[in-house]
C-alpha cells in the first residue's frame, strides 16, 4: 500500500526553499518521493506576480540537483503549483506532498495523484478545449491515486496559464482570436475553464450542456471541489487530485465543504468535522496541530453584497478584488483553526457558488 505524507514548511521569501532542503537533509523525506509542492507566495497574485515563477525556478533547481536531472525534467516529475497573494494575516508557506510504500494500516487514507495537460495554445485558454484537456488530466490523476469513485475526491488543485500581450499576438499572427485581450480577465477565464474541467470529470456538470459561452458567464455551473490558480509561468495545466482511498494507508485524511459566501464560518467547521476535527469554538493548539493543510478559495461576490450589506471589493481601483477576498476569507478561516499558514487562493470562477468557494482540510486522524 502507499501512504501520503504532507509537510507544511514556512518560507522567508519566494525563493526560500531551505526548509524543503532541510526535510531532505534530515532524512525525513526522500526527494524522489515528492509528488507535488503547493506554495503560497507573497506576490500580488495578478498577471505580473513573478513571485510564483521565482519560487518554481528555485524548486526546479533544488530537485534537479537532488535527483540528478535537468530542471525541466524535475518539473515533469514534481507538480509545482504556486498561488500568489498572502494578504491580511496569511503566512507564506509550502506544502510538500510525498508518497512512500507502507504496510497495511488504517484505511481509507489520504490519496494523491498528479497529472499535466498538454501545452495549451493561447486561443484555447478560457474555452472548451481547456475544459476538456483539464477533465482528461483530472481522470488521469484520479487513476494514479486509485480514486475510481468521484465521490471519494475532496479537492483538486490546478495551476493554469493566462494570456499575455505576446501570447495574444502569437494567436493573432496565426489567424486565431483569443477569448479576451484583457490579460487580467484572461486569468478568470482560465481558472473558470479549469474548474469546469474538474466539474466535468467529477460529474458535477453535464458535458452536453456546456458551451464556450458558459465559461466566465454562467456561474450557476460550478464545482464544489475545484481550486484553480492562473499564472504566467506555464502554458499547460498542472492538476493535483486529493481524496480518501481504501487502497492507501497512513494517518491522514481529507474532508471538504463549500462556503456559500466569504463569511460562511459554519462551512469551515463542516470541513473540519469531515476531517475528524470537531470543536464548537476556535481550535485548541492541540487540535490545530493535527491539521496538515487548509486549502480554500476566495471570491468577491458579483452581487456587490454579502448577506445584504454592500462591499466595495470590485470597486477599489487601488487593490484588486481577489486580494480583498483572500484577506477576508483568510481571516474567517484563521479564526476557526487558530493559525494563519493557510492556502487561500483568490479568484473562484465556477469554484463554488458566486461569492463562496470550496474549502478542504487535511488532518491527522483522531
Image: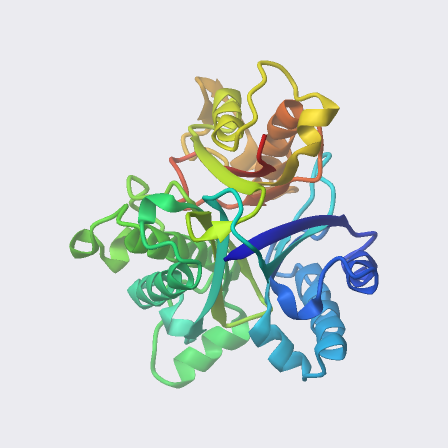
**At 62% across and 81% down in the image, what residue appears?**
72
Q: Nearer the viewer, residue 241 or 45?
A: 241
Left or right placement of residue 165 versus residue 176 in this view? right
In the rendered image, the residue lying farthest to the front is 104
169 in relation to 247, above or below: below
Left or right placement of residue 218 versus residue 323 in this view? left
**At 66% across and 34% down in the image, what residue appears?**
290
In the rendered image, the residue lying farthest to the left is 208
**At 57% across and 14% down in the image, what residue appears?**
280
- Residue 14 horizontal/vertical position (percent): 76, 58
Visible residue check, residue 297: no
44 in relation to 290, above or below: below
- Residue 70 horizontal/vertical position (percent): 68, 84
Visible residue check, residue 147: yes
- Residue 100 horizontal/vertical position (percent): 60, 61
233 in relation to 102, above or below: below
Amino acid at each position: 500500500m502507499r501512504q501520503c505524507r504532507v509537510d507544511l514548511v514556512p518560507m522567508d521569501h519566494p525563493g526560500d526553499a531551505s526548509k524543503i532542503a532541510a526535510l531532505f537533509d534530515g532524512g525525513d523525506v526522500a526527494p524522489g518521493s515528492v509528488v507535488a509542492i503547493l506554495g503560497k507566495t507573497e506576490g500580488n497574485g495578478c498577471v505580473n506576480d513573478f513571485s510564483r515563477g521565482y519560487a518554481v525556478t528555485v524548486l526546479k533547481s533544488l530537485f534537479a540537483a537532488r535527483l540528478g536531472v535537468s530542471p525541466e525534467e524535475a518539473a515533469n516529475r514534481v507538480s509545482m503549483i504556486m498561488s500568489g497573494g498572502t494578504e491580511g494575516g496569511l503566512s507564506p508557506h509550502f506544502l510538500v506532498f510525498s508518497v512512500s510504500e507502507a504496510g497495511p494500516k488504517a484505511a481509507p487514507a489520504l490519496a494523491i495523484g498528479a497529472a499535466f495537460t498538454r501545452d495549451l495554445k493561447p486561443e484555447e485558454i478560457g474555452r472548451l478545449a481547456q475544459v476538456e484537456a483539464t477533465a482528461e488530466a483530472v481522470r488521469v490523476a484520479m487513476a494514479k491515486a486509485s480514486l475510481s469513485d468521484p465521490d471519494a475526491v475532496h479537492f483538486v488543485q490546478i495551476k493554469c496559464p493566462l494570456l499575455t500581450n505576446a501570447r495574444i499576438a502569437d494567436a493573432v499572427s496565426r489567424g486565431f482570436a483569443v477569448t479576451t485581450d484583457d490579460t487580467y480577465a484572461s486569468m478568470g477565464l482560465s481558472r473558470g475553464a479549469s474548474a469546469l474541467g474538474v466539474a466535468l470529470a467529477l460529474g458535477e456538470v453535464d458535458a452536453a450542456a456546456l458551451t464556450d459561452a458558459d465559461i466566465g458567464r454562467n456561474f450557476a455551473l460550478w464545482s464544489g471541489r475545484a481550486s484553480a490558480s492562473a499564472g504566467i509561468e506555464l502554458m499547460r495545466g498542472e492538476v493535483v487530485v486529493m481524496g480518501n482511498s481504501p487502497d492507501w494507508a497512513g494517518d491522514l485524511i481529507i474532508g471538504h465543504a463549500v462556503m456559500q459566501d466569504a463569511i460562511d464560518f459554519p462551512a469551515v467547521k463542516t470541513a473540519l468535522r469531515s476531517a475528524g476535527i470537531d470543536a464548537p469554538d476556535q481550535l485548541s493548539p492541540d487540535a490545530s496541530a493535527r491539521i496538515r493543510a487548509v486549502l480554500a478559495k476566495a471570491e468577491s461576490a458579483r452581487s456587490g453584497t454579502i448577506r445584504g450589506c454592500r462591499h466595495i471589493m470590485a470597486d477599489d481601483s487601488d487593490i484588486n478584488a481577489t486580494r480583498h477576498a483572500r484577506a477576508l476569507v483568510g481571516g474567517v478561516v484563521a479564526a476557526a483553526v487558530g493559525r494563519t499558514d493557510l492556502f487561500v487562493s483568490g479568484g473562484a470562477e465556477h469554484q463554488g457558488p458566486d461569492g463562496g468557494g470550496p474549502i478542504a482540510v487535511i488532518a491527522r486522524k483522531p
